[in-house]
Image (spheres, rainbow, N blue to C red):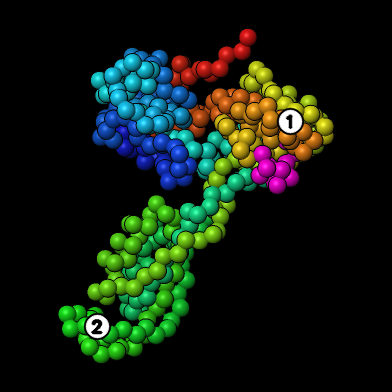
Amino acid sequence: MILKVKNIISELEKLAPKYFQDSYDNAGLIVGSPEIQTSSAVLCFDVTEDVVNEAIERGSGLIVSHHPVIFEGLKKINGTGATERIIIKAIQNNIAIYASHTNLDSVRGGINTVLAEKLGLSDIKILVPKEKILYKIVTFVPPSHAEKLRTAMFDAGAGHIGNYDSCSYSIEGTGTFRGGENTNPFIGKKNVINSEHEIKIETVAIKENLKEIIAALIRSHPYEEPAYDVYLLENKMENAGIGAVGILPCEMEAVEFLSVIREKLSAKIIRHNALYKKVKNVAVCGGSGAGFINEAIAANADIFVTGDCKYHHFLEFTNRIILADVGHYESESFASEIFCNVIRKNFPNFAVYLSQGNLNPVQYF
């Protein structure tokens, strides 16, 4: 089966929309054209030169990675560094490179909820819900055009609240306006203050869709100059955000749960602080999650499973929460499995390969 890169990206971004990435991140199509056609994809954790060579050997036109191959700006691409060599070789061989990083961390079915499931947790919730991403759009329209306007806004991405769509609120009222000499009012007369029966429509949108929704509003509105308001909401997105928190089936000794973690994540070493209590409530954050220890405490977690904790974290939070640093790679190494499941579900006849070069760069002596 041959697909365009953009077809695969479309399905991956249904699970993990790019707008959920953190501001510092660089998720998305990093190298190559979305129009590249390919019969297979190589899936990996990090894009290395070995991974690119593997894609070449397999004739794959797409590499899907968790970590972006370009994370910070490049000022030159002359092949002196590994990243530059990867980019040059990928371009020379018409291979696209796509990354799904903090956006994959921030969705249900992504890194953190899968990590929680692997550890046997239930009643899984987002640890740190997304903020400042929701907006309310308000507009005013004659009753004759209210349904057409709602539909256009919904089709452009408005009206999604959790698992519900087409959400809006309407109320009837009276609008006033006076058109100048150069106007051509849809209703009323120019140079006269008009009072008209209107419907006030309110709906919600995420920041990423605002431009398209407002454009749809203007196209579908009968007025020459439609009035609309856009408000940033303080509401949190409970179904999107970093980390996860859940409950074990039964309370366990901390050392017993560390054994579960080591087995499920194939962790060679778990760095931890004092194992001073039993555990039942568990918080997790794949990758570098030490910045969310306080949020884990606020969620009443007994233990926080993450990677990249520093010495002072273990010292500062002794007897406040058990920290279990399993390693960055170990806490997210299953990212390729998530990509694989999405692609195989939607394109069962398309070939996907879990990279054989998908190795932990951190070795233990």
The extreme bottom residue here reads 192
Q: Which residues are magenta?
A: 293-303
The foreground one among 21 and 100 is 21
Residue 336 falls left or right of residue 93: right
As drawn, 181 above or below 285: below
Residue at numbered disc 1: 315
Q: Residue at x 39, y 61 (%)?
A: 154
The extreme left residue here reads 182
Pinpoint residue 130: horizontal percent, then vertical percent: 54, 49
Q: Where, quadrant-wise, is the N terminus in this rendering?
A: top left
The foreground one among 159 and 269 is 269
Q: Residue at x 53, y 55 (%)?
A: 162
The foreground one among 42 and 320 is 320
Pinpoint residue 157: horizontal percent, then vertical percent: 39, 56
> Can residue 341 be seen from the camera position used here?
no
Residue at numbered disc 2: 179
Closer to the observer: label 2 or label 1?
1
Q: Amino acid at mark 2?
A: Gly
Q: Amino acid at mark 1?
A: Leu
Residue 159 sits in quarter? bottom left
On residue 147, the disc is none
Residue 46 sits in quarter? top left
> In the rendered structure, which disc, 2 or 1, sits on the residue that comes first in sequence?
2
Helix, strand or loop at label 2? It is: loop
Residue 172 lies within the magenta run = no
Pinpoint residue 224: horizontal percent, then vertical percent: 24, 74
Q: Where, quadrant-wise, is the C terminus in this rendering?
A: top right
Pinpoint residue 179: horizontal percent, then vertical percent: 24, 83
User: Dot 2: few (<14), some (14–19), or many (≥20) neighbours within 10 Å?
Assistant: some
